[in-house]
Image: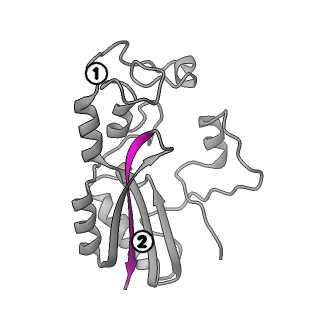
Amino acid sequence: MGYINIDQDSIAELQRRYPDRKFDSGVIVENLNIFDLPYAAESIEEVNADAVLEHLSFKDEPRFLYEVFRVLKPGGTFNLTVPDFEATCRAWLEASDDWRGFFSDSDEDIKALHWFGTHSYKYENRWGYIMATFFGPQNGSGQFHRNAYSEKKLLTMMKFVGFVDISVERFRWQDDRDFMLRTVCRKQ
C-alpha cells in the first residue's frame, strides 16, 4: 500500500496555515478517523505519530493507542514523538521571567513568528515560545496541547497497551527548540 499521511487538515488548509512553506505537488493528506482506521487488524507494518498524542484528551489517548495496536502486524513498529514535559519545565524554570507584550493574534505578528511576546523560537523568555511547547500554538484551532508526557509515563503506557521492546530517547526538534521524546516500540 505504501505510505499514507493522515492529518486533521486537508492539504489546502495546511497550505493556508503555512503560506511560506513549499509543498510538493502530488502530496496527498488523508483525513481519516484515527480512532477507527479503515484498515484490517494486523495489516500495517509501521505507524508513525509525530506530535499527535499531546493533542488528544486523557480519554482519547488510549483509544488512539489501542487502535494503533489493533492495525499493527505482529512485529510491527510504532514510532511516536511528543514534547518532553519534564525538560520543558526545567527550561521554563531557568528562563527569564520578562512578560513583555504577552499575546498577539494579528496576521502580521503570526507571520513574524510572534510567540507570546517574542519574535523568536528561542527559550530565553518564560512567556515566549517555550509556552507553545507546554500548550501548543495558540493561534490555530486544534493545535492546543491537552496532555503531557515524561519518559516514565511513555514506558508505562506502551507496556500497558501491550507493546514490547520499548525505547525512549530525547532529542531537540529542528535542533534548536522543542525538547522532544521519541518512543519506538513493537507489537509482539
Q: Which region is colored magenta?
A: 177-187
Judged from the image, the secondary structure of the residue bearing numbered disc 1 is loop
- Residue 51 as seen in the image, left or right of residue 147: right
Q: Position of residue 123 (x, y in %)?
A: 37, 30
Residue 68 numbered tag: 2
Quadrant of res 152: bottom left
Protein image colouring = one colour
Above/below status of 52 relative to 156: above
Which amino acid lies under the numbered mark 2 shown in the image of this protein?
Val
Residue 96 numbered tag: 1
Count residues near mark 2 (Cα–Cα under 10 Å), then give few for <14, some for 14-19, many for 20+: many
Above/below status of 34 relative to 111: below
Could you tell me which residue is drawn at 41 percent across and 62 percent down? 80
Count residues near mark 1 (Cα–Cα under 10 Å), then give few for <14, some for 14-19, many for 20+: some
Q: Position of residue 141 (x, y in %)?
A: 46, 37
Task: Tell me the CA gap for discs 2 and 1.
Answer: 40 Å
- Residue 99 as seen in the image, left or right of residue 180: left
71 or 177, which is in the foreground? 177
Tag 2–tag 1 contact (CB < 8 Å): no
Q: Is residue 48 magenta?
A: no
Image quarter where the C terminus lies is bottom left
Q: Position of residue 109 (x, y in %)?
A: 52, 19
Q: For the view shown, which residue lies furthest in the top direction?
A: 100
